[in-house]
Amino acid sequence: MSEISRFYGIIITMYFPDHNPPHFHVRYNEFRALINISTGEMTGSMSRRALEFVYEWMDLHKDELWENWRRMENGEPLKSIKPLE
């Protein structure tokens, strides 16, 4: 597991190796979810407010998420992504 961003107590990670479709993992307190990079579809559970922050962050950094997914597939180290401010 590689942490790629952290903001407002929300932790964003990607796992080596991971399955398709391209996604990232979100942890916030007792909540756990997967977010599909293409569709934004969530699997799992997340507080409404935290999910709003995650989607806002995702909209700002979608290209970087795709780049990290490609890096993961190639066995390359992931890059940190700027947190939501």
Image: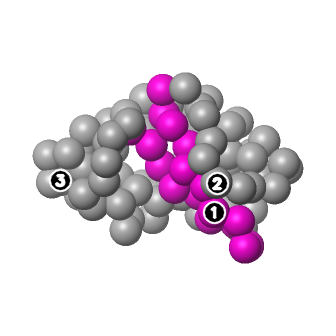
Label 1 sits on residue: 32
How many residues crowd mark 1 within 10 Å: few (<14), some (14–19), many (20+)? some
Mark positioned earlier in the residue sequence (2 or 1): 1
Mark nearest the camera among 2 and 3 is 2
- The answer to the question of whether label 1 and label 3 lie on touching residues, with beta carbons closer than 8 A, is no
Q: Is residue 14 above or below residue 65?
A: below
Query: Which sits in the foreground, 30 or 55?
Result: 30
Give left or right: position of 38 versus 8.
left
Circle 1: residue type: Arg
Q: Which residues are magenta?
A: 22-38
Q: Which mark is residue 44?
A: 2
Instruction: Kindly indicate the quadrant of the structure image that contains residue 65.
Output: top left
| Precedes in sequence: disc 1 or disc 3 | 1
Instruction: Give the quarter of the figure containing the N terminus.
Output: bottom left
Q: x, y percentage for residue 80?
A: 42, 55
Q: CA distance from mark 2 to mark 3?
A: 27 Å
The answer to whether residue 84 is visible is yes
Question: What label does residue 76 carry, if any?
Answer: 3
